[in-house]
Image (cartoon, rainbow, N blue to C red):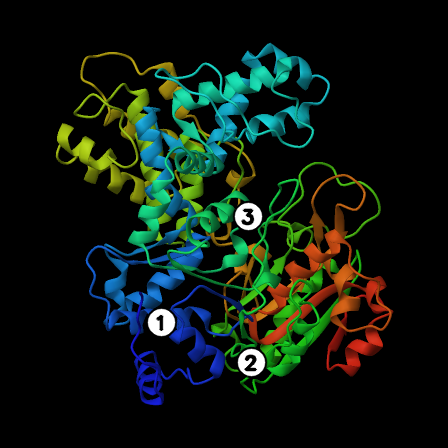
Amino acid sequence: MLEIVPITPELLAELGAELGGCDFTEKSRSDFLASMASCDVQAAPGNGKTTLLTAKLALLSRSWDSRSQGVCIISHTNAARTEVEQQISRHPTASQLMAYPHFTGTVTAFVNQFLALPYLHGLGWPIRRIDDDVFAAEAARAMPYYWELRAQAKKAAATVDSWVRGLDLDVDFVTGSELPESLAVHRRKGQHGADTDCGKALARLKASMVKKGIYRYSDMTALALRALKENPKIAERLRHRFPLVILDEAQDTNGKQLKLLEHLFADGGSAFQRLGDSNQTLYQDDAPVASYWTPGANCIPFDESRRFGQPIADFASRLTTKIPQKIQSVDDKRTLMVVIVFDEKTIGGVLSAFADEARAHWPETFSEKEIWAVASRHNVTGKVKGPWHPKSLVDYYPPYRSEAGTAKEANLLCRQLQKAALLHAAARPPSEVMDIFCGAIAELSRLRGWTGSNGGPITARNLWVTLGRREGELPRKIRLLLHKHILVGNAAWEEVAWKQFCGTLVAMFDSGDGQAVPGEVSDYCGFVRGKEADAVEPARQATKQVTISQATIRLGSIHSVKGKTVDGILVMESEVWKGHAKGQSCLDLATVLPTAFGVEGAAPLSEIGLAAATNVFVAVTRPRELLCLALRKSELVALAEIAQKQGWKVVDLAKGA
């Protein structure tokens, strides 16, 4: 039975002092700290959930003495995991819960470490890369060799391409002692069945990707489910290993991953505590019957927010469309709410108007503030049809480049190093950058015919040890080269510099036998052109920001600011897009503002409208003080009066334009 030290006012005061003056006396907070049973927490934005989680671990660390059992803390994204790790590491005793036998990591890392990878090793299947973009690029390159798919692509190229790039392993695949020639794949909506020519070709293509050791992240979940199906005792062992499991940002874990965790921990044996906010579910479950976390009837509500003042809290509360929640601000922060109105001719002035509001709000310190401009959609590929309206962030700032880049040619060295350079410039955790480096260099090693000391393949996990055994200084030389030319230099973006970089890198893998470089290596090391390598300043290319009169505005999607606290934010009207069919797209602000302003008789939100409401809710709950919306003038007419009554300032760029 799990135990925690008795919760007393004195202990809460001591704990608050340890964590920088926090107050844990509010009933819902002390209830969570004391709970050692399974529970759900529905947490409003800015409630200090991560700090509360750290406080719980600090309490546990005072009495936890087992060397074989631990606390398991699971997050959906690397960003959420990093935030938890940073707070835990700063506490003198809670930090001990980051080492064995405890676990802190993403749900993907948990699935891989304890279930999928051990099962893969047992099957004897090769493992080179687990990466959706790399899989998509390799599968698309192999597709023309399957005449059935090639023939079908002549009728519906985009559809077949989506099948191939998103080819998931089915949990009921059949295998034997040898690598299979065909593997059952998960059938997506509209995808040809397993007994058709196309279905059989997709199964053979999936088997060929397995032989190459290339997988999608969802394949790991399928393998984990298969492992549990064949050996149910694994679940018992995991429940014994982790008597307390905390799922952070629970709303982001959905579909098969959520079902897997619930199968493992929700039926007893472990205390399964799930913390999240259903109103911030941005990651969509594309299954025919969607599966999302929903707090139980007896969940612990965290309704208070320490991030923003009551005006923003009231506006955001009307957007809690999935789990209605009245958010209460506990800090009387100075608040400015602005609607910037524009039309097609004046949309280019929106960012400047936002910068003006920031300068007026913080006349002395505006240049030091963290301010963002975000949209539901990064950019739009292909031709834009129909009447004009802003579809993406690019409509407001044409030079914008998304951080993630594109999946096209993601299997090539240049594209991978471009992505690593962008992540580094965006100050993402070094581990994310190094993961890309390891996978990319391991692939180069394989193409040069190098193997591990035991004759096995060089992988991202054994890369540096294996290279060091070949030549002691080789790992250091390669890392220095990557730092100098990729992270600090411009080799990933400039063709001449790229060729010089690759010449030096490939020479390090020279076997000394005088043999020419294989054609596969030359193809892998080719320079990749595209919008990521357009002739724009490297700093702008990397950081996605614009400086207007000393005000630096960071740019990104709403996904990119999820979980962040910023000083000010501009939410720019853009498109929420789920597909080409009717009812699968809408303009976010135009769709949800009648609900957000509390207009009487506002039409109920459709499915796509609810998705837009979630996007807008996440965005408007990021700022401490300054909240701006950018909206077409035609859409504000019916809302102007009620907006002004609720304290919104209207800046009309289209007036007299």
Question: Gap in Å between the C-alphas at discs 1 and 2?
Answer: 37 Å
Residue lying at 46% horizontally and 47% vertically, measured from the top left: 263
* Badge 3 density bin: few <14, some 14–19, many ≥20, Cα 10 Å: many
Q: Is residue 656 left or right of residue 649?
A: right
Q: Amino acid at mark 2?
A: Trp
Question: Gap in Å between the C-alphas at discs 2 and 3?
Answer: 29 Å
Q: Amino acid at mark 3?
A: Ser
Quadrant where the C terminus lies? bottom right
Determine whether label 1 and label 2 are within 8 Å by CB: no
| Residue 428: image location, x then y, percent | 40, 54
Number of the front mark, 3 or 1: 1
* Badge 2 density bin: few <14, some 14–19, many ≥20, Cα 10 Å: few
Q: N-terminal of the two: label 1 or label 2? A: 1
Badge 3 element: loop
Q: N-terminal of the two: label 2 or label 3? A: 2
Would you identify the image quadrant in which residue 627 lies? bottom right
Residue named by callout 1: 56
Q: Which mark is residue 402?
A: 3
Residue lying at 73% horizontally and 18% vertically, measured from the top left: 155
Badge 1 element: helix
| Residue 398: image location, x then y, percent | 64, 50
Would you identify the image quadrant in which residue 363 lies? bottom right
Residue named by callout 2: 362
Q: Is residue 475 left or right of residue 362?
A: left
Number of the front mark, 1 or 2: 1
Question: Gap in Å between the C-alphas at discs 3 and 1?
Answer: 37 Å
Can you say whether 618 is above or below 525 in the image?
A: below
Residue nearer the viewer, 22 or 524: 22
